Amino acid sequence: MCPPEHFTVEYAINPWMDTEVAVDADLALKQWDTLRNTLVDLGHLVHVLDARPGLPDMVYSANGAFSVDGTVYGARFKYPQRADEAAAHRAFYESPWRYHAPIQVNEGEGDFAYLPGAYGGIVLAGYGFRTDPAAHAEAQEVLGRPVISLKLVDPAFYHLDTALAALDDRHVTYYPGAFSPASQRVLAQLFPDALLADREDAEAFGLNLVSDGRHVILNTEAAGMGRKVRDAGYLPIHVNLSELKRGGGSVKCAVAELRA
Ligand code: ARG
């Protein structure tokens, strides 16, 4: 995680960002701290990356890389405003991880998810707004896992992690409307038992969740999604991330998961 010490909305690279509305910097830090404490209280180890001035989106640390079994596929950001974040993440991963610098544009866990218990371990990968589909093939070569390409079609859900989440090692939840009809068929074939979310869930950033397989941490606004995950047997924990939503992100965007 990376604290929102320099978080602002000073440019707009997704439809959620409004440069006219000021961010409450103190509140953003408090909310971020609550998220970090929630993870720590659940027994998770959280490493903190230093925030850098001039990189207001660095709080969305999930975009900096994608790791699978100790191998790290580095990020290369689409927009120049975020380009320098990649080096900060790279410095964190360089040892003892096996870090691979990418050639293709990709935004790390923003567009990649890993399901270790599905089909022997598969990667789901989004494209359409940020990550170049060529990065999917590159990730497959780096990680040695099948990568399933999924096309995102709604600009409000511009990263895979705004539209789909792993609930545990082999179960996913997603909002079908964020995907092309063909990609919806792919998801239905691979995950016939998926927990389906609706547009309201997705707009509340309810799919931008972090799950440890038992506890599901999600935005407070996503009350409906909380009920759905509870009915599916998980324990929802709501955290208010109203300020981070102004940048177009929530829980998942703020947490890069380390798969050692
Ligand atoms: N403002 C950031 C951007 O548009 C938000 C990134 C959200 N992160 C995520 N994993 N979806 O790039």
Image (cartoon, rainbow, N blue to C red):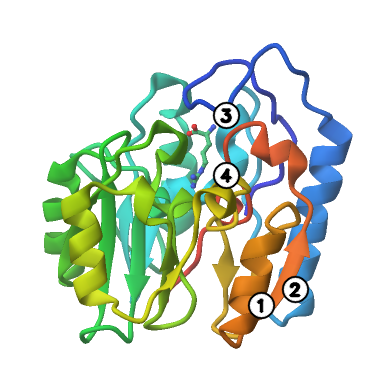
**Type of amino acid at the residue the image marks with label 1:** His
Split into 4 quadrants, where in the image is the C terminus?
A: bottom left
Q: Nearer the viewer, residue 165 or 140?
A: 165
To which residue does mark 4 refer?
Answer: 203
Q: Can you tell which mark lies on residue 16?
A: 3
Graded by Cα atoms within 10 Å as few (under 14), some (14 to 19) or many (20 or more), the crowding at tag 1 reads few
Discs 3/2, front: 3
Alpha carbons under labels 1 and 4: distance apart = 28 Å
Quadrant of residue 97 in the image? bottom left
Circle 1 sits on which residue? 44
Q: Within 10 Å of the Cα at label 3, are there few (<14), some (14-19), or many (20+) other Cα atoms?
A: some
Q: Contact, CB < 8 Å: mark 3 with mark 4?
A: no
Q: CA distance from mark 3 to mark 4?
A: 10 Å
- Please determine whether, in this image, residue 85 is positioned above or below residue 95: above
3 or 4: tag closer to the N-terminus = 3
**Residue of label 2:** 40
Nearer the viewer's eye, disc 3 or disc 4?
4
Residue at image coords 41%, 63%: 95
Report if the CB atoms under discs 2 and 1 are less than 8 Å apart. yes
